[in-house]
Image (spheres, grey):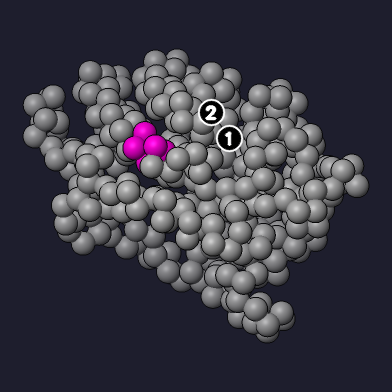
């Protein structure tokens, strides 16, 4: 049965309740279109359809982000609230901001952590959220999402990736003390934001890249013992406010999916099917009754290097497999990279907007 008058929010909510919708929900969670690709798309849409990128995407994207206002201490240029500094590193057509200063890199003891200036939920004004929610909903009712609860990542951004992994073996007490402080912030931050949102925020984006191209970045037991409990605690708080947890990890994470479900993840995001062992049929078949999915369209191969018909075929397959019976929000697996043909980007969204086979049409 078609739902011809669904709002963006209703469409996503139905999908997350494992129900079929008028069309597949579409989003760009932990995604976007990198500047060179966006400029090329802007020119293509202006020439071929006489519209802007924003005008093209606005009726299609069902999820929007909202958040409180930062009112904490002034931050130095390119330095975040954790004390991490980033500098631009060119990839030719543009640049990514990469970490070049890890404030906890030299830390040797708990005393060094105590001396660090940790962010506080008091650094944010949550009273602005009702107004920001109203503004986000001014052109229609959207599914609203808070971000960004990345516990392991926030920790290694401060400490260094290699050093945190070394700590988990050589100095686990120090690693866990960092995770604890990061978790305490996110628990307080999201609790206050969700309370201020008064039931209008449906999703909270959490993340930790735990997979590489060929497998997990650490052993499953190490993840279960050292990372999972902190997310479990955070997810419990999010669920207490009636919101759902959408969790991002790139890479080959199939082995961790049962643990992710156990720790309270409602929506698995990214779905890097170019990584080893990542199979949409197995994901849906084994876990689709209890887990929802977002993302999936390849930004490694199909979008940058395929033809429009390849993109259309991939989008249709993902909708048919992951969208059968609801439970799927389609989008690119990550940021759409420079050099991606605009025709491929348009093929992604045009196809998602009209393909109905998963819904029995």
Label disc, if present, on residue 265 of the rendered structure: 2
Q: Position of residue 264 (x, y in %)?
A: 51, 24
Seen from the viewer's position, the closer of residues 121 and 214 is 121
The answer to whether 115 is drawn above or below residue 46 in the figure is above
Q: Position of residue 59 (x, y in %)?
A: 66, 63
The answer to whether 337 is drawn above or below residue 165 in the figure is below
Residue beneath label 1, please? 268
Question: Is 78 part of what is drawn in magenta?
Answer: no
The answer to whether 203 is drawn above or below residue 110 in the figure is below
Q: Residue at x 26, y 40 (%)?
A: 121
Is 70 left, or right, of 32 in this rendering?
left
Q: Secondary structure at mark 2?
A: loop
Question: Is 193 part of what is drawn in magenta?
Answer: yes
Residue 321, visible in the rendered structure = no
Q: CA distance from mark 1 to mark 2?
A: 7 Å
Is 126 left, or right, of 107 in this rendering?
right
Seen from the viewer's position, the closer of residues 37 and 75 is 75
**Magenta residues, dominant SS class:** helix
Q: Residue at x 22, y 53 (%)?
A: 71
Please state the extent of the stretch shown in magenta in the rendering.
191-195
Seen from the viewer's position, the closer of residues 102 and 360 is 360
Q: Is there CB contact under 8 Å for labels 1 and 2? A: yes
The answer to whether 66 is drawn above or below residue 243 in the figure is below
Disc 1: CA contacts within 10 A as few (<14), some (14-19) or many (>=20) = many
Q: Residue at x 76, y 54 (%)?
A: 5
Quadrant (top left/top right/bottom left/bottom right) for the N terminus = top right
């Amino acid at each position: 049965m078609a739902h011809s008058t669904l709002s963006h929010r209703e469409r996503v909510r139905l999908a997350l309740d494992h129900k079929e919708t008028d069309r597949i929900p579409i989003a760009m969670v932990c995604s976007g279109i990198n500047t060179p690709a966006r400029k090329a798309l802007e020119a293509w849409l202006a020439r071929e359809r006489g519209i802007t990128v924003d005008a093209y995407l606005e009726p299609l994207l069902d999820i929007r982000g909202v958040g409180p206002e930062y009112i904490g201490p002034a931050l130095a240029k390119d330095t975040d609230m954790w004390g991490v500094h980033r500098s631009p590193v060119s990839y030719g057509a543009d640049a990514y901001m990469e970490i070049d200063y890890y404030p906890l890199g030299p830390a040797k003891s708990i005393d060094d952590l105590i001396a660090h200036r940790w962010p506080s939920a008091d650094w944010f004004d949550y009273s602005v959220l009702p107004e920001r929610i109203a503004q986000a909903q001014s052109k229609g009712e959207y599914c609203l999402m808070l971000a960004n609860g990345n516990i392991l990542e926030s920790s290694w951004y401060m400490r260094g990736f290699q050093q945190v992994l070394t700590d988990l073996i050589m100095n686990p007490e120090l690693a866990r003390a960092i995770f604890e402080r990061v978790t305490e912030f996110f628990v307080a931050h999201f609790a206050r934001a969700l309370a201020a949102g008064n039931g209008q925020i449906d999703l909270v984006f959490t993340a930790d890249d735990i997979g590489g191209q060929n497998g997990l970045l650490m052993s499953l037991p190490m993840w279960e013992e050292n990372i999972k409990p902190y997310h479990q605690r955070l997810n419990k708080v999010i669920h207490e406010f009636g919101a759902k947890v959408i969790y991002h990890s790139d890479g080959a994470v199939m082995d961790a999916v049962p643990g992710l479900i156990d720790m309270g993840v409602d929506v698995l995001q990214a779905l890097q099917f170019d990584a080893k062992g990542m199979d949409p049929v197995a994901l849906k078949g084994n876990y689709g009754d209890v887990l929802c999915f977002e993302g999936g369209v390849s930004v490694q191969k199909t979008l940058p290097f395929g033809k429009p018909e390849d993109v259309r075929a991939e989008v249709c397959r993902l909708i048919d497999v992951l969208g059968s019976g609801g439970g799927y929000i389609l989008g690119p697996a990550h940021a759409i990279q420079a050099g991606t043909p605009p025709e491929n980007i348009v093929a992604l969204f045009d196809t998602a907007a009209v393909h109905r086979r998963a819904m029995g049409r």
